[in-house]
Image (cartoon, rainbow, N blue to C red):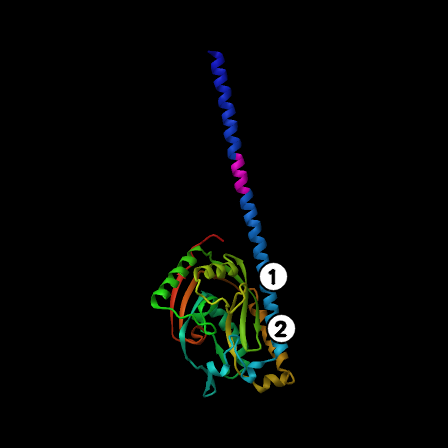
Amino acid sequence: MARVLQWSHSKTVVLLWFLTAIIFYSLFQMALRNSISNSTSSVSMALNEDRRSKLYDGMARDLDEKGPAFLKHGETSQSLSLSDIFILKDGAVEPALKAANPPVRANVLYLSTEYSVPISETIKRIINPYFDKSIWFQNTSLYHFSMFHASHHIAPVPATENEIETEATAVKDVAKTLCSLNIVLDRVVLTSTGVLLGCWQVVSGTDPVTIRTKLRTALPRAPEKQLYDAAILHTSFARLLGPPKASATEMHNADLVKFFHELVAHLNKELRGFKAAISELWYVEEYDVLALALNGRMNVRKFQLGCTRN
């Protein structure tokens, strides 16, 4: 009887050790997979950050390479003539709204007025003294980051009401999988087309590259050629449409490029490093050309980003 008890005890000890070893091994494998996943994610984020930095470097050089083309009524970054989208009325800039046929269907990340208002106030305080009325400021309630177009003016994709509803539902489903973004303003640049842009980096959350990849999968009818690089995260702050006051150019010996560089340097001194958070993805039907930029007619569907893990 003693031998039976001793044997039973030995088997119990062996079984416990065996179960402990299995549990330890399983936990070790989980930790290893998480470590590999986190490492891969960190590498991917670093690569995307570097890719954005190079894009922003190129955008910052644009003014030097092409000069202030906006003073000669050039084109926008979307191949639209400035005279097609803006008019001067009593010396002030007004949008020349034109119907988009078919309506553009854009997916954008929204920047809340909690962040857009202080940015806009800073920009106006710095640049208004040097200009009269030849500036168009982005509506602070419509600050956005263009992500992906289901249809745009260069490659229009007509859609029925049912197809539009299907697209909106697909975008809503994508939003549920995206984590809120914490972002930081990397720099402000002025392009040769006169656009004052905020160029951002991602601190945490779902990277724009991933967001665009998911939207591409969710919207298979979308144009193959999109308007922007997959990594970029930028928003328009304002658009310059005319020269600065004569007094400003006289201070710089009529060197306009130098003047604009110093103006941008002042903006960067105040705004670089500004932090913000993004928690909404919008599906927008723009009934007017560039409605989001020009306060035109549009229909907006707003979706909260569903993932809270950064």
Residue found at x 59% / y 57%: 46
- Residue sticking out furthest to the left: 162
Whether 14 is drawn above or below 298: the answer is above
Q: Relative to 149, does residue 181 appear above or below in the rendering?
A: above
**What number of labels is visible?**
2
Q: Amino acid at mark 2?
A: Arg
Spatial separation of the CA atoms under disc 1 and disc 2: 17 Å
Q: Position of residue 87 (x, y in %)?
A: 46, 84
The residue that disc 1 covers is 50
Amino acid type at circle 1 is: Asp
Residue 220 is situated, as x and y percent measured from the top left of the image, at 44, 62
* Image quadrant in which you'd find residue 160: bottom left
Q: Is residue 5 above or below residue 61?
A: above
Q: Residue at the top extreme?
A: 1
Q: Which residues are magenta?
A: 24-31
Q: Residue at x 49, y 19 (%)?
A: 9
Q: Secondary structure at mark 2?
A: helix
Residue 28 highlighted magenta (yes or no)? yes
In this view, the residue in front, 65 or 250, is: 65
Of the numbered discs 1 and 2, the one sitting upstream in the chain is: 1
Query: Quick one: 37 or 121, which is closer to the camera?
Result: 37
Instruction: Using the image, tell me which numbered label, if any, was put on residue 61.
Output: 2
Residue 72 is at least partly visible in this image: yes
Q: Is 126 or 287 nearer to us in this picture?
A: 287
